[in-house]
Amino acid sequence: MVWKKQSKDFVGGLLKLSVEFVIVVLLVSQHALALQVEVYEGAESVLLPCRVSFFLEDTTVLWHCDDLYPEIVHSWRDERDELTGQDQRFRGRTSMASDGAESGDLSLTLRQPHLSDSGNYTCLIRKQSSELTLTLIQLRVKVSPVEVKVQEGSEFIQLPCQIPPPLPEDARVEWSRSEPKPIIVHVYPNSSNLLLEEFFCGRTHMNKDLLKTGDLSLTLKYPTDRDSGTYTCTAHRDGDVLRQKVVLHHVREKFSVWAKVLLALLAVGLVAGGGLAIYFWNYFKTISRMEVVEVVFGSKSVQLPFKATTTLPEDASVEWRLSGLMLKPTIVHVCKGGGDQADTQNAEYKGRTEMVKDLTDGDLSLTLSQPTDRDSGTYTSTVKDRDGRILEKKQLTLKVKVPQVKAEEGVESVVLPCKDMFRPSADDTVEWSRPEPWPMTVHMYQNSADYHEKQNWIYRSRTEMKTDQVMNRDLSLTLKNPMAFDSGSYTCTVSRDGKVLKKRNVQLLVTETDSSSLLTDHQE
């Protein structure tokens, strides 16, 4: 079989000796690639994928869940289930393929998934007293969203959300909306206008006795077409997080008489030459464009431009915030009275941001050093006077681009590009590395030749850099027999005497040959 041949090339006989196997297990037992699987509650089943490309002999396959560890979700050995120590929650709901040892398919089928099944699942193999973690799965069991419609002109609409009462006094409820950007709509208790989107201020309220009734529904006043979208009700209770999604559809009224007359006039205008139609089109059309700044992953820095249109007072303050996948914006940089307020910014950005000290010249641009893909998102800069009044505001989008290479398991090889660099000298070192599932050297090139001494055993005999290409400033890496395990971020670094001269990143995604998606909803 193909997987046996790949296994033989990949491991190079390493797993044939049990002693060497134990050493490998001890080195990598704490590391895994996190995959995400989503499914709706009520589905017939969900598959948690786990595959290997080497032969399993005298080993036990274990599935664990972080919330229950060390309790067992499922155990399998010698092509049969061993469910003596299985947690009661999963009894009768789990199964694995009977030919898993031969096919390398150690995936777990979980039937009738519940909300309480959400969590981190680990697939590992055990040999004697050592363990090797293969896969980390983040399972998310979702509730089917409730759909609500509201007619145009309605005074209010209620977004339903119910959980079993009673709720403790310290319970916290948060209503949010995910599009067109993540925003907070309402918070209980003590909603703070500093956290809420201005568009919803004064238009939302919740029942005062919600702790007793469990009715967490949100009343939204004077709904408009801009309110359409997906809302999430999130309740924090005794360490548990409960979520319910509601999709709001704003339905416009049927055309009134005056609207029909207007359409008739527009039609006449079109027939007459389109003059009237163009007038109304330009009158009603609204264009909202946000400036986009793009930078390549690994660049030294990127500047987010902002030039004030008015003269600013000396005591003006400027705050840069980032909003992306998170609901609450992150403070990136704060400058007040010509001085940076480092104690207020997020720890991830300390030492990486800079603004000019004198704000009176109107240059409010932010310089962000060493941008990564985690920095992508919408940045909002707000200028205020000493009384807190907003003087100016600007939004822009930062996109940190990382080259991505895709391949399927079973192909002969894949090339990780790193071109247009420079020709390394004999004193330079070219190193390909990856930070996860643990820091490792994938390939090293020194003195115009491959250097295998520091190369991780996983990539032995599977990587190659061609000398003729290197001489042409092409430091691309050829990876043979790519597997799903190889997916992740790779960095090509050129250094001299320990000093980094150039660095380039590339993302590799290796999919299974059946091209099945990990983010699927299994419906009945």
Image (spheres, rainbow, N blue to C red):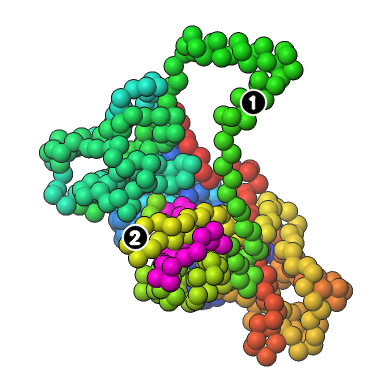
Q: Position of residue 8 (x, y in %)?
A: 67, 63
Mark toward the start of the polypeptide (1 vs 2)? 1
**Residue 311 magenta:** yes
Query: Can residue 58 be seen by looking at this rendering?
Result: no
Reply above or below: 361 against 119: below
Going by the numbered disc 2, the residue's amino acid type is Gly
Q: Nearer the viewer, residue 116 or 457?
A: 116
**Residue shown at the point (74%, 67%) measured from the top left:** 418
In this picture, which residue range is highlighted in magenta?
A: 306-326
Q: Are marks 1 and 2 in contact (CB under 8 Å)?
A: no
Q: Position of residue 338 (x, y in %)?
A: 44, 75
Distance between the Cα atoms at labels 1 and 2? Answer: 41 Å
Horizontal and vertical percent position of residue 249:
42, 27
217 relative position to 45: left or right:
left
Three-letter code for the amino acid on which mark 1 is drawn: Tyr
Dot 1 surroundings within 10 Å: few (below 14), some, or many (20 or more)? few
Predominant secondary structure in magenta? loop
Task: Please tell me which residue lies in front, 103 or 162.
Answer: 162
The residue carrying mark 1 is: 279
Task: Identify the residue under disc 2.
Answer: 388
- The quarter of the picture where the C terminus appears is top left
